[in-house]
Amino acid sequence: MTDLVARDLHKSYGPVPALRGVDLVVPAGSFTAVLGPSGSGKTTLLRVIAGFERADRGSVTLAGVVVEDDRHHEPPERRRVGYVPQEGALFPHLSVEKNISFGVRERARRGRRVEELLDMVGLAGLGPRYPHQLSGGQQQRVALARALAVSPAVILLDEPFAALDARLRASVRAEVLDVLQRAGTTALFVTHDQDEALSLADQVAVLDGGRIQQVDSPRGLYAHPADPTIARFLGSANLIDGTFARGVVQTALGALALDPAAAAGPEGAHAVVLLRPEQLVLGPPEAAAFAGRVLQSEYFGHDAIVTVVPESPGRTLGAETLVVRITGGVDWRRGIVAGVRVVGPVLAWPASGRGAGHADRRPPEG
Amino acid sequence: MAMTAPAPRAGPAVDRPAVPARPRRPPGLLFGLAAGVAVLLAVPLVFLLVQAAESGWAALRPLLFRQLTAQLLWNTVRLTVVVTLLCAVVGTLAAWVVERTDLPGRRLFAVLLVLPLAVPDFVESFGWVSVAPSLRGYFGAVLVMTLAVYPLVFLPVAAALRHADPAQEEVARSLGLGRFRTFWRVTLGQARRAILGGSLLVALVLLAEYGAFEILGYRTFTTEIYTEYLNGFDPPAASALSLVLVALSLCLLFGEGASRGGGRLDRTGPLAARPASRHRLGRATPAALAAVGALVALALGVPVGAIVYWLFHGQGVAVGSSSLASAAWHTLAYSASAGVLATVLALPVALLSVRHGGRLARLLERSTYLVLGIPGILIALGLVYFSQRYLFGVLYQSSPLLVIAYAVMFFPLALVAVRTSVAQAPIRLEEAARSLGTARRSVLLRVTLPLVAPGLAAAFSLVFLEAATELTATLVLHPTGVETLATQFWAFQTNLSYGQAAPYAALIVLVAALPSAVLGRWFDRLPARRPAPLERSAAAA
């Protein structure tokens, strides 16, 4: 049973705190993403786990063995942690084979192990090449093979796809995921890209301000973010004003049913209400409690994103625009007045909490 | 003669830093070593100031404001200004013709135009004077020095033009600038920093030159200081001359730093694989060929021809081959020791600045570049006085002191190369190796050393080349009875025994050409050894 447990990790660079009490459990065989904006401490967390940095406080346990705590600092070479840095960091003076076999001690096993791994990452036959002769995606896969060669307890990947161009990223992601699943290795990767985290990982930990804010499955996280900031960070979100009432929340779009999982506030209290673009539908203005004029319409083929500004200044919306994702064939052109309805129950938080006010207006990063 | 090969380009900036650059606290030992190196390098300058202070202002003032000083200042400045300008023009034009036009044989010319670097200034000057004895004074000095040092501008400018983004010129043309204005405003702009840097080196060489001017009978501060030294030393007088010389040099050094200006001159985007398109010379081809050919003939043909002539038509005096061999041995031994010492000294400074950064580390590194502004003769004399004063003359005219002098003089060259090579082995590679289960010492052997070695070899070669062709400090510091190629050449040439001097000159040129070849190979291999940033190689694939 191999897993990774971090407890109360603290790390500062001079006066600047990077980690302020990180707790994280990575179950064996899982693929966990640490998602956070730049400067949130993601890379520091990986480096502490890998042993390149000494934690100021807290502990790291790998496969049941404490490798880092107040008294103890196991050097990186004794941790059995595979580390894949941002740009692969292949040794430029060694061939692909030599790179992969770098950490394999037993001379006799080297040749076969290299063959196996080259096969696994789909680069059979490229062994004699040098890193500069490979494409970016190939380099990334060699770096992965090199880390897997030593059968590590856990693999750490630092923004593994950030340096690839968009076209390449999707295919490399799929390949890496496939390799890791076949190898059955526990893996932890950090990223600032929420699409990447949601689509690849089976567990996502949101890191911000040096602390883990929420850990959940991608679905759970998207459906039930713990606060408006996280909601914003995980994809497009309309955050509007509301007032809690019995079982519902009163908004400019009418009385909306509350999600049972939502932390309802006392009746009459102000609320911040989350409306994902796909929870909204457009229709004729007469049929809806709320009407808006189309400001902009971006067409993507499979769907379209329509931005709407409130038409009737009646109840205050609490947001300047609403973003709606539509799949229908209707061409909502600029200037058309449309009614906006909400489908299904919604999430809401008491307005005084974290992320209320202007903080949740922060544009999502990445 | 030459001061340097061009600083290798730092390579395209990696698009995203792998680890956010946070200053890592340097280990105390590393910091101590680097500080020690900085102190050693400061010794000559400090000693110069101490000596001046001891002489006192009252003694210095009449020496500073006398006819001789004015005369030397005029001589030095008018030569430096004119030769530097000539070199900037000749070097830049030659680089442009070779790199940006369809000149026939441009590859061969690219090599031939650099080769005068392997001919020390005093050999260049010997070559010219031995075939044209009437060539003396100001005009002789301007001609010979321009031919000897223009490669210092040519090399960096050629590199800058080769790496410049061709799209910039194309954009300028599309914005309505004609060919000539495009050249003036864009092409020269791309090469501006290279031209300034090369010109600075030229000017510093001119201020420090002794041998060539002595042969040409042209008096500058450096020749005068050496003469003073030969005639038994008068500290206040030497001090006064040295102060003016060092002031001139340091003004140049700081002036260049200030005139560099802001803005980046590199490409803005990722390196395009596309080479610059070449201008058609058309009917100007014969004229361009003739000009470049003449430059090669004058700068390379004359001195090499003169050496070959004197080798075969000397006064028929048999050259004691044993003394030639022993001089060659001494030159090799001294230069190699200096190469090793300078490289070793440069390591802690380069490690500190590349791996740890921080304001103090940068300041420390910068301070070592001050040495560039101190002419070799002053470094040699500074070390002489230092050893006499504080070491009871123990090291005076000893081999170690000569080696130390070389290492100090050429330290900045070693630092440039070592710095580049340390940057070739980023710390993340070492981390990757350690996470693969490799212990620290083993990482050093298997990862760091193989990556750093070519750069260390380049640092060694640069210093070796400079030390082997150095004359002034060698004349001051070489142990009694021990001759190097340069000092033995000098002895024969002073007696006008050209035939006997020729084999020594030939050997010096050969010895200098060898490290140049090593360097050329190193620069060629650099790109292949650079870890390819992902995006770029992906785009190329």
Image (tube, grey):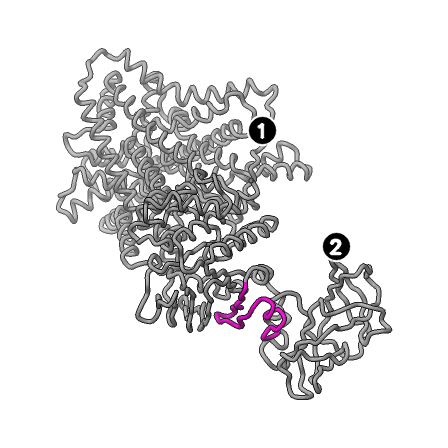
Residue at the disc numbered 1: B278
Determine whether A187 is above or below B138 in the image.
below
Q: Which mark is residue A301?
A: 2
Residue B248 visible in this rendered orientation of the protein:
no
- Residue B222, percent from left and from top: 30, 36
Name the quadrant containing residue A53: bottom left
Is A99 placed left or right of A200 in the picture?
Answer: left
**Toward the viewer: A92 or B397?**
A92
Q: Quadrant of the N terminus of chain B?
A: top left
Give the x, y percent position of residue B18.
Answer: 46, 54
- For marks 2 and 1, give the CA distance: 46 Å
Q: Residues within 10 Å of mark 1 (few under 14, many from 20)?
A: some
Could you tell me which residue is drawn at 46 percent across and 45 percent down? A118
Q: Which residues are magenta?
A: A202-228
Q: Are marks 2 and 1 on the same chain?
A: no
In magenta segment, residue A4: no
In the rendered image, which quarter is residue B512 located in?
Answer: top left
Furthest residue in direction bottom, as rendered: A267
- Could you tell me the amino acid type at mark 1? Arg
- The percent position of residue A311, horizontal first and vertical second, equals 81, 71
Give the image location of residue B268, x and y in percent: 56, 46
Residue at the far right in the pictured view: A286
Q: Amino acid at mark 2?
A: Gly
Chain ID at mark 1: B
* Residue depicted at x 42% and y 28%: B114
Which quadrant, please, contains the C terminus of chain B? top right
Q: Report whether A248 appears left or right of B161.
A: right
Q: Which numbered disc, 2 or 1, marks the residue closer to the eye?
A: 2
Vertical side of A268 occupied by B453: above or below: above
